[in-house]
Amino acid sequence: MMKIKILTLFPAMFDCMHESIVGRAIKSGIIDFEAVDIRRYSRDKHFKCDDTPYGGGAGMVMTAQPIFDCINAIDPDHEYLRVYMSPKGERLSDGLCRELARNDNLLILCGHYEGVDQRVLDLCIDREISIGDYVLSGGELAAMVVADATARFVDGVLGCSDSHEDESFSDGLLEYPHYTRPPEFMGLKVPEVLLNGNHKEIEKFRRQKSEEITRARRPDLLGKKDGE
Ligand code: SAH
């Protein structure tokens, strides 16, 4: 079982985690998922959680106090790996998701506005992770990406235990194309080899397609180690 706590000003955004594969894992108790409202921990009488930046400049900064108290209430003994979503963090990859999935407890802090007071990051956060070189309005979508992609590596989350072994990146290659019924659609036929039940031939065809598509689209992946 993996515990995932998300710290956010917008917990309702995480309702969609209760759908599909991750939703099923939550229902069956493999993932214990909670979106915690940082605002509840604000000691301000109006539950304010942001303020103007020292030194001037645009926008608002999330204040340290509510985040600090929230983290210490949830994780007083620092049993969670504490991650802050940030465009300045290390870039998320298949390998990093596998690594995160080895933690039993994962806490993800979502920033908003201009970001978070640096002091609470210095005091509480173990790791900063970015999902790519672009700026989102908040860490919520990024946290969902991390939670979803990480949950897939927790034992029992995917229906069939080996179903991520074939997937893109798992062996340093992009995945082969998929086909399902009908055998012909708008004049396009399913490749013959997939219909004849010869598993050796099918495996060879898929490997060849994987290599072809990786060479064409992501030559940078060739020659890399798994999940790198
Ligand atoms: N001023 C900051 C960006 C703030 S964006 C800067 O220029 O670096 C507001 C919040 O969205 C951030 O605090 C962070 O939690 C989240 N965020 C934005 N882009 C992200 C990305 N690429 N990956 C992960 N989190 C991101």
Image (spheres, helix red, strand yellow):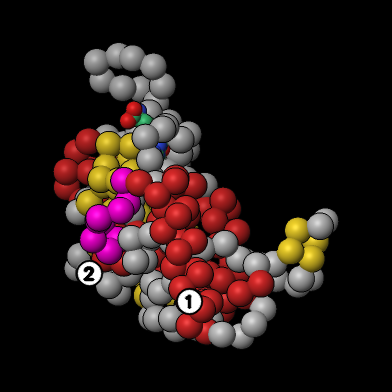
Query: Which SS class for mark 1?
Result: helix
**Between 188 and 116, which is closer to the camera in this rendering?**
188
Q: Looking at this view, is 9 or 99 the one in front?
A: 99
- Relative to residue 30, is residue 87 drawn left or right? left
Helix, strand or loop for disc 2: loop
Q: Quadrant of ligand 1?
A: top left
**Residue 153 seen in the figure:** yes
Observer-side mark, 2 or 1, equals 1
Name the mark on residue 79.
2
Q: Which of the marked residues, 2 or 1, is nearer the chain's N terminus?
A: 2
Counting the numbered discs, the total is 2
Task: Say which quadrant the N terminus sits in.
Answer: bottom left
Q: Which mark is residue 203?
A: 1
In the image, residue 189 sits, relative to residue 37, either above or below, namely below
For the residue with label 2, is its CB less than 8 Å from the closest atom of ligand 1? no
Quadrant position of residue 107: bottom left
**Which residue occupies the foreground of this view, 166 or 44?**
166
| Three-letter residue code for mark 1 | Glu
Residue drawn at 20 percent across, 54 percent down: 126
Residue 80 in the image: state x and y as whole percent. Answer: 26, 66
Residue 54 located left or right of residue 17: left
Q: Is residue 127 positioned above or below 226 on the image?
A: above
| Magenta stretch prevailing secondary structure | loop
| Left or right of 113, for residue 198 | right
Q: How would you rate the neighbour count of disc 2 (Cα within 10 Å): few for under 14, some for 14-19, many for 20 or more?
A: few
Q: Which residues are magenta?
A: 220-228
Give the quadrant of the C terminus: bottom left
Label 1 CB sits under 8 Å from any ligand 1 atom: no
Residue 23: x %, y % from top left: 57, 71
- Amino acid type, callout 2: Glu
- x, y percentage for residue 100? 29, 64
